[in-house]
Amino acid sequence: MHELSVLQNIKKVYNDPYPHCVTDRALPEKYIIELQNNLPDSYIDSKPFATVDPSQRIKWKTLQEDNWPVANIWKDFFAYHTSREYFDAVCNLFEPWAKKMSILPQKITLDDRTGINNKKNSHAYTECQFVRHRVMPGGKTTRTAHLDNGMEIYAGLLYFKHPQDTSTGGGFNIHDGPKSPWHDEKNNNEVDNPGAVVRTCEYKTNAFAMFWNTRNSVHSVEPRKNAQHQRWSINIIGRYYRNRMW
């Protein structure tokens, strides 16, 4: 497995309430330190938050288009996690559910978005994003319980916490939510009755959570207490271009 793969220390995939995995040590320490020391803070500082969104998402493709001088380790990280090799590794990790939904690597034509956009000829694409969430007033959460885009295949989140951040909370919650009809293609489908929290990926550097997107993949972010620093993470996504294949 690739030395920068966020899957290398996954020990177990949980079935209930939906397929997911969590680890508090995704990458070897030497790599996570180098990645954190080279986060593109100044670039993202130049991009103001939207007035309607507490999060800011910078796609790898955007950095490339702007010719931003990203550290080589981040180039390697993003290249691998948008690659065919990683997509296939995720499908293998979640194999029972991938087979059930007919998402088999050999059936998928993938556009990794690192070169020519093959949208017309591809079933799916992969994407990585730098994400930061603003500090919310009153310790509110930046993401209440919700379902992701209905075209999403899988989503992973790798945390980076500021070394001087002494806040608590901010973890990624897995909810025992009700099975729902397929939601629309919006990115934030709020869930009024998300059910109990069955597992939380703690907000700390190198913690990683991932889930296979299903009808009941309800998740949220814990509120943060005493937050003074923005919340950093990396989103790693696989998504269909057009209609789902199941």
Image (cartoon, helix red, strand yellow):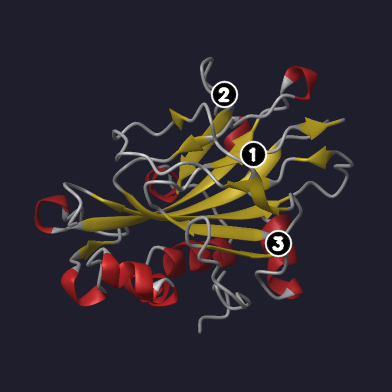
Label 1, on which residue? 221
In the visual, does 186 lie left or right of 4? left
Badge 2 local density, few (<14 within 10 Å), some, or many (20+)? some
Q: Residue at x 54, y 29 (%)?
A: 47
Dots 3, 1 in contact, CB < 8 A: no
Classify residue 104 by image quadrant.
bottom left
Q: Secondary structure at mark 2?
A: loop
Residue closest to the eye, 62 or 99: 99
Which amino acid, mark 2? Phe
Q: Earlier in the sequence, mark 2 or mark 3?
A: 2
Residue that extends furthest to the top in the rendered view of this protein: 51
Label 3, on which residue? 206
Which amino acid, mark 1? Val
In the visual, does 39 lie left or right of 87? right
- Above-or-below relation of 23 to 226: below
Q: Secondary structure at mark 1?
A: strand
Q: Nearer the viewer, mark 2 or mark 3?
A: 3
In the visual, does 110 lie left or right of 6? left
Q: Secondary structure at mark 3?
A: loop
Which amino acid, mark 3? Asn
Q: What is the CA distance from the residue labelled 3 to the residue labelled 1? A: 17 Å
Measuring from the top left, give residue 110's x and y in whole percent: 23, 64
Label 2, on which residue? 49
Residue that extends furthest to the left in the rendered view of this protein: 120
